[in-house]
Image (cartoon, helix red, strand yellow):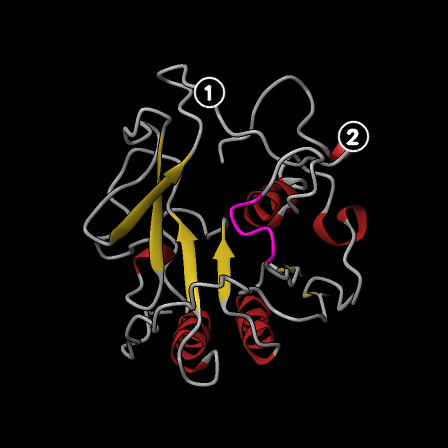
């Protein structure tokens, strides 16, 4: 369970058109379901709606309804993880083989969990070989806690050389207090800063019992 020693360089820059994310062929690695659903493939926990919020910030269409994502013309390839190392690794290879240009990850293993070779190798392979050899851009959100994610004997998965580690900043361009940091941090992304009582982001949500629509904002 030690980290792989084979690091990958950062991939080549994306084309300015930003037509980035995938083709078709969404899949759940929890159930092998080609049409993942919240109840069957993600579960009914408070995290069930996270993917919808994140993907909306990326690719919500600029159609005059609700919000628009940062890349409204992108194509999205939804992949639900299986939360087992071998399945998580297979999900990266699956996404790479379906032509994804960017893979965004707002998940990780518990703090202090050793990196697993099979996952690290899959991430490095995807970062190196995706986009027909140009490399796939892989983003990993850092932890939602004020700590160094990048060093120590068991650093966070966002510390891998082949990924871009993303921490959080508020609307005043200050690092969110309850967000990780360290020398592996590449960029900060807009987010809510609850300790400073700064607002969050408006984003798509699931309706009904699976949504965040309970009067509070998710920390995106």
Camera-side residue of 44 and 204: 204
Camera-side residue of 168 and 13: 13
Which residue is pictured at 38% across the width and 42% down the height? Answer: 143
Label 2 sits on residue? 209
Q: Quadrant of the N terminus?
A: bottom left
SS assignment for the magenta stretch, majority = loop
Label 1 sits on residue? 199
In terms of secondary structure, where does tag 2 sit? Answer: helix
Label count reads 2
Residue 13 lies in the magenta stretch? no
Camera-side residue of 176 and 15: 15
Residue 71 lies in the magenta stretch? yes
> Of callouts 2 and 1, which one flags the residue occurring earlier in the amino acid sequence?
1
Looking at the picture, how far across and down is residue 112, in whole percent?
A: 35, 50
Looking at the picture, how far across and down is residue 219, in whole percent?
A: 49, 31
Q: Work out whether 195 lies above or below 65.
A: above
Which residue is pictured at 43% across the width and 82% down the height? Answer: 129
In terms of secondary structure, where does tag 1 sit? Answer: loop
User: On the rendered structure, is 164 left or right of 98?
Assistant: left
Looking at the picture, how far across and down is residue 146, in whole percent?
A: 29, 33
Q: Tag on residue 135?
A: none
Distance of label 2 from label 1 (alpha carbons): 23 Å
Give the magenta-colored segment's residue range.
69-73
Instruction: Estimate how packed mark 1 is, as few (under 14), some (14 to 19) or many (20 or more) residues with alpha carbons within 10 Å.
Output: some
């Amino acid at each position: 369970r030690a980290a792989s020693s084979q690091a990958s360089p950062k991939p080549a820059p994306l084309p300015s058109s930003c037509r980035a994310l995938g083709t078709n062929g969404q899949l759940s690695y929890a159930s092998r379901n080609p049409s993942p659903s919240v109840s069957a493939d993600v579960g009914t926990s408070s995290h069930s709606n996270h993917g919808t919020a994140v993907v909306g910030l990326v690719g919500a269409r600029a159609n005059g309804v609700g919000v628009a994502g940062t890349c409204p013309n992108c194509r999205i390839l939804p992949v639900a993880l299986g939360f087992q190392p071998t399945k998580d690794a297979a999900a990266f290879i699956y996404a790479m083989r379906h032509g994804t240009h960017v893979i965004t990850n707002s998940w990780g293993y518990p703090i202090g969990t050793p990196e697993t070779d099979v996952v690290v190798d899959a991430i490095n392979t995807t970062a190196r070989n995706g986009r027909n050899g140009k490399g796939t851009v892989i983003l990993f959100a850092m932890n939602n806690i004020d700590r160094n994610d990048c060093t120590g004997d068991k650093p966070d998965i966002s510390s891998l050389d082949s990924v871009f580690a993303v921490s959080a900043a508020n609307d005043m361009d200050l690092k969110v207090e309850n967000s990780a940091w360290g020398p592996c941090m590449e960029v900060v992304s807009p987010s809510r800063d609850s300790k400073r009582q700064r607002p969050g982001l408006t984003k798509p949500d699931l309706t009904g019992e699976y949504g965040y629509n309970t009067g509070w904002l998710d920390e995106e």
